[in-house]
Amino acid sequence: MKGKDILREIIGTSGGEFYTPIPKGYKPGKTKYIVITGSVMSGIGKGTISSSLCKCLQDRGLKVEPMKLEAYLNVDSGTLNPFRHGEVFVLDDGYETDLDLGTYERMLDKNLSRDNFVTSGRVYQTIIEKERSGKYLGRDVQFIPHVTGEIKSFVRELAVKSKADIIPIEIGGTVGDYENMFALEALRELHYEEGPENVCFVNITYIMQPNSLGEQKSKAAQLGIKRLIAMGIQPDVIVCRSESKLNDKIREKISLNTNVPMENVVGVHDVSNIYSLPLALRERGFDEKVLQTLELNKKFVSNGNTGLKKWVKETSVSGKGKKLTIGIAGKYTGSSDTYISILKALEHCSFATNHKIGIKWIETTKIEKGDESVEKALKGVDGVIVPGGFGVRGIEGKIAVAKYCREKNIPYLGLCLGFQIALIEIARNVSGLKGANSTEFDPKAKHQVIDILPEQLDIEGLGGNMRLGGKDVEVKPGTITAKTLGNANKIRRRFRHRFECNPEFIETFEKAGVVFSGKAPKVDIMQIFELPKHKFFMASQFHPEFTSRPLKPDPMFLEFVKKAAE
Ligand code: GLN
């Protein structure tokens, strides 16, 4: 029996042990699936390899729609602490996701939506809501088949909505975690129902090379993959991540122990430039093997490596540009994942300008406590970014940084919180409003120049309820901002905030030399401002970093980098 027939049989069985809701319009076999799991440990580049695979497939002309199944019980990523979990990435539709979605968007140059990111919390929330409204028709609701059934339903809904040729599904976490057990079980069922020619399992594993031995060891990888097999999932392709080139003895051992032919065991050792990874994977036959499993390799033939080689060239930095140091004044400076989209946006500028950009992390809590002077913290810095953030810690340090940049003519780019910080600074030090602040940091501030958005006043709780996602911004003609944006009169950017420039102070700010060069259509929400007399001083209430793409750097970032280089 072929997969399609199995599925037909299951759908035809009502009231039985199966629970496989099939969305309207679903055509079995139209969309194929790649399930990407990790074994041995996390942090080995599962997201990067998955997105590189997507790039290879897109390069062959497939319509690719990546999906991430995240194991945690949060309904979305909005309430996660970026210091622990990395940046919260905001999609155009306002959904708050894990930073991996940013990697996919940048790699594929494509906007994704809430359908591309599903957490266990969202699955359970759906189930509990359905149960309360009697949708399970008197059945006891069970992990199998109901939880697994809902997970498959999310996957198939994406297939129907997107009409994709292929949906690569990345499973968060590592094989053996309790949290992702049901996702794995759901995808085992998907493989059974859709048939082996429609679902390809890829496992990304890690080959250790302990210093004391100096040689590669495959035991941990073997055990990790066996665990997957014990769950009824036979990988079709295995990617072995290792520090140095994968040796053949290890490839043989992996093959022997996991039923995966040698030619389907692909080695990926550390590369310095992740943009070269799609080409490296192609050269090792990775996308070809995956498409062979799915019987798509003849339909979507590789165009040679021309496209991917061009991409590598376009994403490299020649030695011709300058060496710049950009200061990022935040508080989560322990991990670069916290500000990953900002680092990527700067990287995109370096592709366009050939300037090599180094980062200096400016820990503003130190400045605030008086442990470090602003002069010292900003020494050798060509430009400063004050990124987004929440809460009062480090705020006074950031205000001191903004003041120094304004007074010393150092290029300044303010992003969301960085917009608010610069306005507070100008209110205090140019307009003379002593005690000016945001009500986020001082609810009783004498001059509440930054205040909560009226729409936010009645909202309780913290999940998914900020002013979120892609919105239009009207650009004021004749401003530096307009010029920077190619004289566009309207742009669309992504937001994530609760507070705004208090409209009562717009005039005060304008008298102080602030030009509000971008605002929300119809309402008085200020969204970009500039200081025209300054070398470069621009700030936005939105996050331009979320929409910067490798070959289409965000224009505000680009202008900032160019001015920093002058
Ligand atoms: N905390 C500020 C607000 O809520 C800034 C938010 C941000 O930087 N993303 O408006």
Image: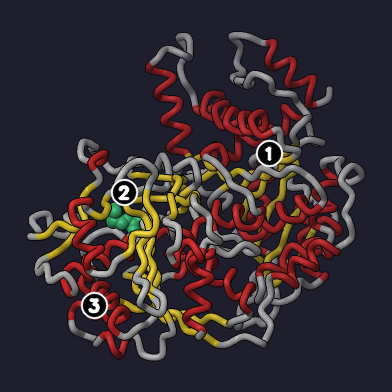
The residue lying toward the viewer, choosing from 86 and 492, is 492
Q: Residue at x 25, y 78 (%)?
A: 403
Badge 1 is on which residue? 232
Badge 3 is on which residue? 400
Q: Is residue 218 visible?
A: yes
Q: Is residue 60 above or below residue 387?
A: above
Give the foreground label among 3 and 1: 3
- The numbered mark at residue 501 is none
Determine the quadrant in which ligand 1 lies.
bottom left
Q: Is residue 563 above or below residue 302?
A: below
Looking at the rendered structure, the kind of residue marked 3 is Ala
The residue lying toward the viewer, choosing from 341 and 17, is 341
The answer to whether the beta carbon of the residue marked 1 is less than 8 Å from any atom of ligand 1 is no
At which x and y percent is residue 141?
Answer: 46, 20
Which one is earlier in the sequence, the residue at label 3 or at label 1? 1
Q: Is residue 243 visible?
A: no
Q: Residue at x 69, y 52 (%)?
A: 203
Which one is earlier in the sequence, the residue at label 2 or at label 3? 3
Q: Secondary structure at mark 3?
A: helix
At which x and y percent is residue 145?
Answer: 56, 24
Q: Residue at x 35, y 74 (%)?
A: 329
Q: Secondary structure at mark 2?
A: loop
Task: Tell me the distance, in whole angstroms, between the alpha carbons under discs 2 and 3.
Answer: 25 Å
Q: Secondary structure at mark 1?
A: loop
Badge 2 is on which residue? 525
- Counting the numbered discs, the total is 3
Disc 3 residue crowd, few under 14, some 14–19, many 20+, Cα 10 Å:
some
Q: Give the left or right position of residue 426, taking residue 137 as reference.
A: left
Disc 2 residue crowd, few under 14, some 14–19, many 20+, Cα 10 Å:
some
At which x and y percent is residue 68?
Answer: 57, 45
At which x and y percent is residue 199?
Answer: 74, 38
The quarter of the picture where the N terminus appears is top right
